[in-house]
Amino acid sequence: MKKDTIYIDVEDDITSIIDRIKSSPEKIIALVPPKGSAVLQSVVNLKLLKRAADSMGKKPVIVTSNQALTALAGGLNIHIAKNLQSKPVLITDDKNAEIVNDEDEVEVSDKLSDIEDRPNHVNLREDGDELELSGEEIESLNSPDSGETEESDKKKNKDNKHNSIPNFDNFRKKLLMGGGIICLLLLVLVLVFGRTKAKIVVRAETTPVDVVFDAKLDANIAQSDPSSNILRALIQESKKTVSQTFQATGQQDLGTKASGQVTISATCSPSTFGLTIPSGTAVSSGDKSFITQETATLDDLGPGCVLSDTVAVVASQNGDQFNLSPRNFTVAGNSSVTAKGTQMSGGTSRVVKVISQTDIDKAKEQINQQDTSTVKNDLKQAFGRTDIIILEDSFISSFGEPTSEPAVNQEANEGKLTMQVSYSILAVAKNDLGASLDSFIATQMTNKDQQRVYNNGLDNVRFEKQSVSGRTAMYKISTTGQYGPQFDLEAIKKELAGKKFGEMRSYIQNLPGVKGSDINLSPFWARRAPDASRIHINLDVDKNSLSN
């Protein structure tokens, strides 16, 4: 069996509540009183409510956590519930709770009688007996002076006799001053708070969507294409000249080579006559080698049929250890000839530090490892905007050709490497990214004409870098979005205009797809909705939908 919900306003009386129960088509009626309402905290009102409901064959359920109201309702066999989602219970004297399910059958009388408005008295039934209360007795139930005795009245009258005659001129002045102050306060309140306004938040039942797609960020394009996930990247760049000093670790022998001559000889024979020893041939004495500087041709016939030729030689390495006295040498690759050298001289030794390529590579690596946090922060601040998302991991450094002073292989104890470095970082506008998120969520909707995006997940979006190259980058975008029903807000505003607070809430709660609502009327004394032009409605996501 379906239930109907009636929200009671502070100014509602018991007669209006009974009329609304009567007009409801349902048999089970949930009554939701506001805090501070006293209309249902009267035994007389509750009995009238119970009698009217019984006569119409309906079961009222009071939704409250107020212990006093719970006790009163239990004493009159009226069901209560802590909230709209809990099962109604009947609090009996033995403190056993009787649960009423929606499927319970409710016996309806053949004839539903209305509550008669009786100004002088009402009839209440209690324990099978008819109880008649006059209008004065009903009024005395709520009168704060009902407990005073006749003696106290006599005492007051006696005291009044001793009071002096009041000064009506002073009273009139005070009354006028008080009235003026009240009018002034009312004028200030009207000026400050203005006319009635209504701010309403409607929490809709939504469907979550896992958003995952690859996006290309390009700083070379002028406009984004959200449907294709191509987004215009914002970029900040700077160039700086950086340098790094280093110690030279290379070594180079800057000494001189010893030189002299050798005479190459061979015994005269057909195989040796005209024999040539090419230039660059090594002649050695022990571990000291010299290199011939010209070709030797054995065509000079000497005494004893000896063929010979004299050529210049230079030591294979620097160093004074090659300054040798005249001696015999062996000719590499030819054992049929002999060689005799003259005095070898001019060799010197001098090993010095020089700049090596290894020194330059290490200095470049040190520049790569320099702290760039200051440069990065400067680039981020250069954007000067709050409507963007800066991609921290898109920060890159590009190095130009290094210049070393002194150059490679030059003598030095230390050097200095200088390089041109380009820095850059990318960002994306929130509007562009949000449009791409909306476009993706729209592809997951079941009915685009009657659904809309409630939360595209922009606040919790995650970026996973795929690649960054200068002014472009590839990122994987992921988040969770929400879509739900589409509402005609202008039509809702027109329906709410002029309604009481409870009627507003009841109307909104009955809209398809609505899970909850928050209504705020201002100024604080407002009890009815203003006209449609002064009603503002925001759509929000139901918190339970997010947790699911």
Image (spheres, grey):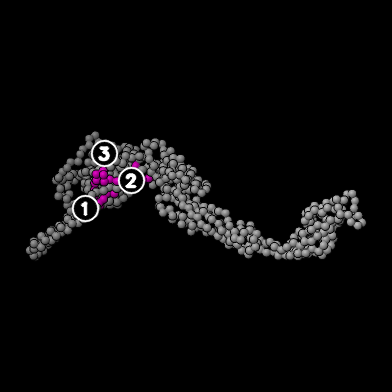
Residue drawn at the location 79% of the way across and 61% of the way down? 260
| Front residue (pair 155, 323) | 323
Say which amino acid is labelled 1: Val
- Whether residue 254 is visible, yes or no, is yes
Density class for disc 3 (Cα within 10 Å; few <14, some 14-19, many ≥20) is some
| Numbered badge on residue 24 | 3
547 with respect to 134 (left or right): right
The C terminus sits in image quarter: top left
Density class for disc 2 (Cα within 10 Å; few <14, some 14-19, many ≥20) is few
| Front residue (pair 442, 364) | 364
| Front residue (pair 82, 89) | 82
Q: Quadrant of residue 232?
A: top left
Residue drawn at the location 20% of the way across and 39% of the way down? 114
The N terminus sits in image quarter: top left
For the residues bearing labels 2 and 3, Cβ distance under 8 angstroms? no
| Place of residue 467 in the rendered image (x, y in percent of width and height, measured from the top left) | 52, 47
Circle 1 is placed at which residue position? 190
- Whether residue 147 is visible, yes or no, is no
Say which amino acid is labelled 2: Asn
Q: In this view, does 123 lie above or below 167?
A: above
Circle 2 is placed at which residue position? 538
SS category of the residue bearing label 1:
helix
| Numbered badge on residue 56 | none
Residue at the limit of the structure toward the right, as seen here? 304
| Place of residue 384 in the rendered image (x, y in percent of width and height, measured from the top left) | 41, 54
